[in-house]
Amino acid sequence: MIRVADLPATHPGRRLLTKRTPFFVAPNEPRCSYCVYVPTGWTPETELSVMVAVHGTGRNIGALREAFIPFAERHDLIVVTPLFPVGIDDPDDVHDYKLLDAHGIRFDLVLLDILEQVRLRWNAHVGTVLLCGHSGGGQFAHRFLYLHPDRVAAVAVSAPGSVTVLDHSLAWPEGIGDTRQRFGITVDPGAAARVPVLLVIGGDDDGRADLAAMGHPGHSRPEELDRLAESLTRHGTAVRKVVVPKAGHNAAATRPPIVDFFADLLAGNA
């Protein structure tokens, strides 16, 4: 694999592999892919931090990456946007990645393999990353935190339609009682609690009709977020919660609090 540092500064590959990159196949799982934004200030000698932004059900990767470019330039970090496509082994399955495992794929491990490739190609710091996601991406993000708290510097969860609580009496994905059998990992709430968490939602994002249509009648997104907040707080997590006034289920509306949360952390103010 070509490392960007190995290319002469005038090589056309430098232009291809900095700023807005093309999509790359994920290592070990070619049905998944990712693209990257590498900021203008990148140099081969600089080990930049990484933010991972996980898409929702609509999988609008281009817009997702584009939205975080100003943040990447301001704070000199690399943005990684994985793509977990619709229809792996089931042409109608749009939800598989949200639970981290489906159809024999461990989507959490796919992301870890992607991060290792990002480390090698761009000399990036991927030991711990900033992680965020809206809707289905928020589901992925908090579940990834549970399984890999040592790989997350902070996580921002926006408007998830369903959540996993830190309850050993419930099986995954409602709780964490069987993660040893399912993932080979016993979730440690104390380890997860060391990672700061932002929970954010639009003030008008009820979501009852959407959740009922997906087989979860009687639930709302605010109620799900409250359940997650209560579970995390009870186990010692420092949780910041933001409700965006007059906003619906809209990733653009909940993005400013995510940017502010990560900016505070990077500045040492959180």
Image (cartoon, rainbow, N blue to C red):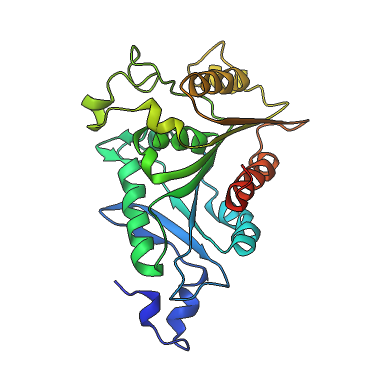
Left or right relative to 53: residue 33: left
Q: Quadrant of the N terminus?
A: bottom left
Q: Nearer the viewer, residue 235 or 29?
A: 235
Up/down of 246 relative to 150, above or below: above
Up/down of 154 relative to 237, above or below: below
Residue 44 image-quadrant placement: bottom left
What is the tally of numbered marks visible in this picture? 0
Q: Nearer the viewer, residue 127 or 122?
A: 127
Estimate the x, y position of residue 221 in percent, counting from the top left: 59, 22
Residue 109 image-quadrant placement: top left
Estimate the x, y position of residue 29 in percent, counting from the top left: 28, 51
Residue beneath the point at 48% across and 67% down: 21
Q: Residue furthest right?
A: 246
Residue beneath the point at 38% across and 61% down: 118
Answer yes or no: is residue 92 visible: no
Estimate the x, y position of residue 205 in percent, counting from the top left: 67, 26
Residue beneath the point at 69% across and 45% down: 256
Q: Quadrant of the C terminus?
A: top right
Q: Nearer the viewer, residue 137 or 244?
A: 244
Estimate the x, y position of residue 144 in percent, counting from the top left: 40, 37
Left or right relative to 75: residue 43: left
Answer yes or no: is residue 118 visible: yes
Residue 206 image-quadrant placement: top right
Residue beneath the point at 64% across and 47% down: 264
